[in-house]
């Protein structure tokens, strides 16, 4: 049986009002988080005019094309409008010269990766939302501002992630002060801020992780047993980026294990609800993943070769098992090498990222040791630790199955959807220890480090 408590109040109160009821405190928190997201994303986007080396021009092209009623396919060149932006902005850390700034119709061959949009295989939801809103705003704001506006849509992705995280923490009966500090901490993760201040479907990853936490909270924290919310959440998450659904899939595994326990303890109504939720999550994943793969399979150049093949991956040397597990612990340092764009990196941000690495790894381990086995907090710690270990293996497996190659460069951004769960572990450990003052001091230190860096106060 699941323990009835996390650190004090019961987390299994049946008949509670929905967490989606709009209250005055929630309105104030919504306004404050919107302002914080706008300030941080706005500063980061303005202070880093160069495009991110993480394929930002291809993601911007995908958003631009969907906004204009087109869907990229194999061999699709990046749109001239996006190439013009790329030529004038350049790529952070990219030394070779691009086409001259100001050309009306630049040659795609003058750009990285033959100037092709090789990210067409991603599902379209992030790009449709970002491109559609950016084009709508572009029609109102005089001048060619699509790229900047697409970056600023990240404010909405970040704001949604913050609000959902707050709701999830409150659904676990986390006191409001701790939940607010957790909500404020999320955009202070450099990886989260970077993703949300560039055009990249990683911007949806924090929201995906927060939604996974909320799905789990509704079951074990509130006894809200419907299958519709988990299923719709899975549909939306997979439609942004497939790897983003990893925490929700791990939640589904946890619910499946709990369903067996409930069945054995004669709580078969709960067991059936959990099984329905698991089935809904699995079905949603397969429908979107397989459906989009089938849609794109017959489109474009049938002889197309990915221009980035062999750049980050290499042939296997030795046993596949040895190569695949060589990146097993990449998830143990999620913030170490994923800071804001190079033009605004600073020493304070590096120190803050290192501190977050320690917290992200330590918090789920502390949850596993501080609480009784299979208590709610213990389960959150187990889910988080499983995700941190699993995502490098998932990335390696995907690359191996599609190319037969080894992928040594598993970037922390692939596990960005796990960070809201790791943050929830931090908050619950702080709550258990009564460390509100220490948590507030850490949040303040992180806020100063991030604001000083993106605000240009430090180099």
Image: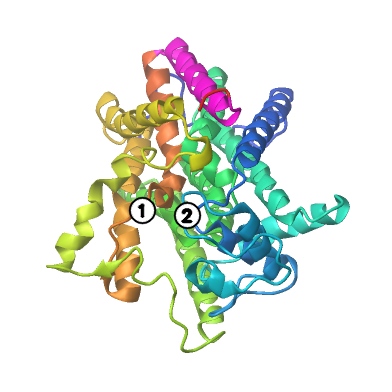
User: How is colour applied across the structure in the image?
Assistant: rainbow
> Looking at the rendered structure, which numbered label has been put on residue 148?
none
- Distance from disc 1 to disc 2, alpha carbons, whole Å, reads 42 Å
N-term-proximal mark, 1 vs 2: 2
Residue at figure coordinates x 85%, y 49% from the top left: 141
Of residues 108 and 305, the one drawn nearer to the viewer in this rendering: 108
Circle 2 sits in a helix, a strand or a loop, which is it?
loop
Q: Residue 193 in the image: x percent, y percent?
A: 54, 39
Q: Main secondary structure of the magenta part?
A: helix
Q: Which residues are magenta?
A: 434-456
The image quarter in which residue 316 lies = bottom left
| Above-or-below relation of 423 to 301 | above
Residue that sits furthest to the bottom in the current view: 302
> Looking at the rendered structure, which numbered label has been put on residue 94?
2
Circle 1 sits in a helix, a strand or a loop, which is it?
helix
| Above-or-below relation of 201 to 110 | above
Q: Which residue does the numbered mark 1 point to in the structure image?
A: 253
Q: Residue 126 in the image: x percent, y percent?
A: 61, 58
364 displayed left or right of 225? left
Residue at figure coordinates x 31%, y 34% from the top left: 361
146 displayed left or right of 182? right
75 displayed left or right of 403? right
Crowd around label 1: few <14 · some 14–19 · many ≥20 (10 Å):
some
Of residues 105 and 70, the one drawn nearer to the viewer in this rendering: 105
């Amino acid at each position: 049986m699941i323990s009835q408590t996390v650190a004090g109040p019961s987390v299994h109160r049946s008949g509670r009002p929905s967490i989606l009821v709009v209250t005055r405190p929630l309105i104030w928190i919504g306004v404050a988080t919107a302002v914080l997201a706008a300030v941080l994303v706005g500063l980061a986007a303005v202070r880093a005019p160069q495009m991110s080396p993480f394929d930002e021009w291809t993601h911007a092209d995908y958003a631009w094309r969907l906004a204009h009623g087109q869907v990229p396919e194999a061999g699709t060149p990046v749109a001239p409008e996006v190439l013009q932006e790329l030529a004038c902005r350049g790529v952070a850390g990219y030394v070779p010269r691009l086409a001259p700034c100001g050309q009306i119709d630049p040659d795609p061959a003058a750009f990285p990766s033959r100037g092709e949009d090789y990210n067409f295989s991603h599902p379209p939801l992030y790009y449709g939302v970002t491109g559609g809103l950016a084009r709508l705003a572009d029609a109102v704001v005089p001048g060619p501002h699509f790229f900047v506006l697409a970056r600023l849509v990240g404010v909405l992705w970040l704001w949604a992630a913050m609000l959902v995280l707050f709701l999830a923490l409150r659904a676990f009966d986390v006191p409001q002060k701790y939940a607010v500090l957790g909500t404020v901490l999320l955009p202070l993760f450099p990886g989260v801020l970077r993703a949300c201040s560039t055009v990249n479907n990683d911007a949806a990853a924090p929201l995906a992780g927060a939604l996974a936490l909320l799905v789990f909270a509704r079951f074990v924290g509130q006894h809200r047993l419907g299958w519709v919310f988990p299923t719709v959440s899975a549909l939306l998450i997979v439609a942004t980026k497939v790897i983003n659904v990893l925490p929700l899939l791990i939640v589904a595994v946890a619910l499946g294990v709990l369903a067996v326990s409930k069945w054995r303890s004669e709580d078969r109504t709960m067991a059936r609800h959990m099984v329905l939720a698991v089935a809904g999550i699995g079905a949603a994943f397969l429908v979107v993943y397989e459906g989009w793969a089938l849609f794109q399979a017959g489109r474009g150049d049938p002889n197309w070769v990915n221009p980035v093949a062999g750049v980050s991956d290499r042939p296997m040397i030795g046993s596949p098992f040895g190569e695949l597990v060589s990146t097993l612990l990449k998830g143990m340092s999620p913030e170490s090498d994923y800071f804001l764009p190079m033009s605004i990196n600073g020493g304070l941000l590096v120190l803050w990222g290192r501190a977050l690495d320690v917290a992200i790894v330590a918090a789920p381990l502390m949850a596993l040791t501080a609480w009784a086995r299979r208590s709610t907090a213990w389960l959150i710690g187990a889910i988080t630790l499983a995700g941190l270990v699993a995502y490098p293996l998932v990335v390696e497996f995907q690359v191996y199955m599609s190319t037969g190659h080894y992928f040594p460069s598993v970037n922390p951004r692939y596990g960005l959807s796990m960070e809201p769960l790791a943050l929830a572990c931090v908050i619950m450990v702080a709550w258990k220890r009564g460390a509100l003052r220490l948590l507030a001091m850490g949040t303040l230190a992180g806020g100063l480090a991030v604001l000083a860096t993106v605000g240009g106060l430090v180099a």
